[in-house]
């Protein structure tokens, strides 16, 4: 008697679609990619993709949000393990710079999507909403990091989250054009200047 392969859970299907989308977007860019290509790369039908994401844009935004949160969680985990605030800032910066240098595809996709959204009000609103959610998660992580060490934030956690993301994106853009222009410790030094107690 043949055994049946268990049907993947909704979460597993969603993750397969996200993983396939990441590969397709990285290879072809956002504008040149289609839902059909993503479905094929995931080994699924277009219907399976659409049952998890209403549109290609929703898929892109979910992918970016997942990536930003994972990157930030890794950076905060590195900072959490540090014995003091200076080491925490250095480790947080080093983690984010490592992500910028080793995972530049994500930054390129973000920049491409921002350019597309600039000319489309619906895309722009979706991007704005997701970025606000992402910034809120970053702000919460920053608050937790400072509170755990009994430190006072130099500005609101929301403003600091905007600054951290802006610096990260700016360094990624500069590093993409000229990798030698962005030393590995630059992010940590900049964040250290902002958060100096």
Image: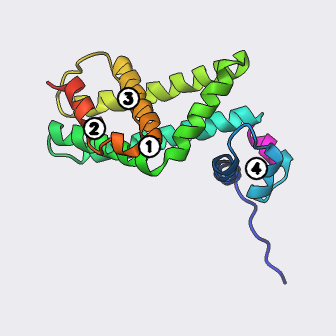
Pointer 3 with pointer 1, Cβ within 8 A: no
10 Å neighbourhood of mark 3: few (<14), some, or many (≥20)? some
The reply, left or right, for residue 169 in relation to residue 66 is: left
CA gap, disc 1 and disc 4: 23 Å
Magenta residues span 48-54
Which residue position is annotated with label 4?
Answer: 38
The answer to whether residue 196 is above or below residue 48 is above
Q: Closer to the N terminus: mark 3 or mark 2?
A: 3
Q: Closer to the N terminus: mark 4 or mark 2?
A: 4
Q: Nearer the viewer, residue 19 or 83?
A: 19
The answer to whether residue 156 is above or below residue 111 is above
Which residue position is annotated with label 2?
Answer: 186
The answer to whether residue 143 is above or below residue 59 is above
Find residue 108 and report its horizontal and vertical position in percent.
56, 39
Is 50 inside the magenta-drawn segment?
yes
Find residue 113 and report its horizontal and vertical position in percent.
63, 31
**Most common SS among magenta residues:** helix
Q: Closer to the N terminus: mark 3 or mark 1?
A: 1
- Residue visible at 44% across and 52% down? 102
Task: Tell me the SS state at disc 2.
Answer: helix
CA gap, disc 2 and disc 1: 17 Å
Task: Tell me the SS state at disc 3.
Answer: helix
Pointer 3 with pointer 2, Cβ within 8 A: no
Pointer 4 with pointer 2, Cβ within 8 A: no
Colour option used: rainbow
Which residue position is annotated with label 1?
Answer: 71
């Amino acid at each position: 008697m043949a055994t049946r392969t268990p049907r993947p859970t909704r979460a597993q299907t969603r993750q397969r679609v996200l993983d396939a989308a990441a590969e397709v977007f990285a290879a072809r860019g956002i504008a040149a990619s289609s839902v059909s290509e993503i479905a094929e790369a995931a080994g699924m039908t277009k219907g399976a993709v659409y049952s998890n994401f209403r549109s290609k844009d929703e898929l892109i935004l979910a992918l970016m949000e997942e990536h930003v949160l994972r990157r930030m969680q890794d950076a905060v985990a590195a900072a959490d393990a540090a014995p003091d605030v200076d080491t925490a800032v250095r480790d947080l910066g080093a983690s984010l710079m490592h992500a910028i240098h080793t995972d530049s595809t994500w930054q390129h996709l973000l920049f491409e999507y921002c350019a597309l959204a600039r000319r489309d009000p619906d895309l722009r609103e979706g991007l704005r909403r997701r970025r606000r959610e992402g910034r809120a998660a970053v702000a919460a992580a920053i608050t937790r990091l400072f509170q755990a060490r009994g430190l006072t934030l130099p500005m609101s956690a929301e403003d600091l989250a905007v600054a951290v993301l802006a610096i990260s994106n700016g360094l990624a853009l500069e590093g993409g054009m000229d990798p030698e222009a962005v030393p590995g410790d630059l992010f940590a030094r900049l964040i250290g200047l902002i958060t100096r107690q």
